[in-house]
Amino acid sequence: MNNSKILTRTALAAALLAFGAHAALADQLDDIKKAGKVRVAIAIGTPLFSYADANLQPTGSDVDTATELAKDLGVKLEIVPITTAARIPTLQAQRADLVISSLSITEERAKVVDFSIPYSAITIMVAAPKDMKITGYADLAGKRIGLTRATTNDTLTTKEAKGAEIMRYEDDATLITSVVTGQVDIFSSTPSNMGEINKRAPGKNFELKFSQLDSGLGITMNKGEPKLKEWINGWVTTNLKNGKLNAIYKKYHGRDLPADVIKAG
């Protein structure tokens, strides 16, 4: 092979490597800005975080958070409605750019997706009627407990509540209906969901029996998106410091964000 052919092939190989490197460095943040919209996956059916209002329009603290993020990014918001169990799969399948849907930051999830610093928080607890004695996981043995599939509640309860019969529902709205209609009397969920249940079935007198976890929530994105992650972390930090994220949370949940979330900003 003569030198000119060797040089030609070397140049071609270098060009291909450069193209591949450029493609690898391409960032979703640029794609979102070029598209003029950000696709945010939200499970509509989680009271206070994301639910349908009287006009069947999405509302809640996560919806307001997504709205503010899109506005500050300078693009339109496209809500991708999903089930709770589909939050991470939807992101991995590239059907959404972000997930803002009460998704707790956990080590297991962080192996497959990236999280922002906490923008909000959720309390996970076990609740039951006031006259039922439950003080810990051991008291759940032989009892039926309802929860939402593919949540931190599911992971914790499956691990700790040995001997319990776990009833899994596709979203919080279905779980709430199941409790209100008497399909289950014990459930693992959030204080906001317990409040909704007591509003719809006041005679049952559900109360918190024990807390399972206070968990920070992260805006979720696919791995390998450094510019997008940096922008989102900057946005969360700014809006924790200026009080906007706290105001959104307080508007729907009736209380301030936990101090450790605010300090993280």
Image (spheres, rainbow, N blue to C red):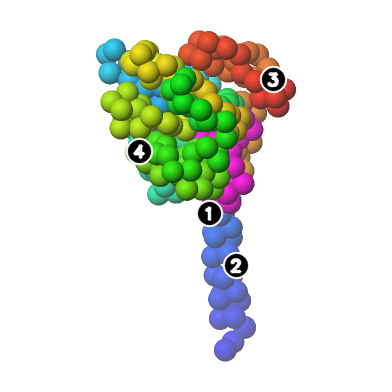
Q: Secondary structure at mark 2?
A: helix
Which range of residues does the magenta coloring cover? 101-118
Front residue (pair 114, 52): 52
Residue indicated by mark 3: 259
Q: CA distance from mark 3 to mark 4?
A: 32 Å
- Residue 246 rendering spot, x and y as whole percentages: 59, 15
Depth check, front residue: 78 or 25: 78
Quarter residue 114 falls in: top right
Q: If the image is split into quadrants, where does the N terminus sit?
A: bottom right
User: Residue 35: horizontal and vertical position, in percent?
Assistant: 41, 35
Please identify, in this view, whether the residue under mark 3 or under mark 4 is nearer the observer: 4
Q: Write down the residue under mark 2.
A: 14
The tally of labels here is: 4
Disc nearest the viewer among 4 and 1:
4
Q: Depth-wise, is mark 1 or mark 3 nearer the camera?
A: 3
Residue under the point 51% across and 48% down? 162
Label located before the other in sequence (4 or 1): 1
**Dominant SS in magenta:** loop
Residue 114 visible in the shown view: no
Residue named by callout 1: 23
Residue 106 falls inside the magenta stretch: yes
Residue extending furthest toward the bottom? 1
Give the residue type at disc 4.
Tyr
Tell me the residue that label 4 is attached to. Answer: 169
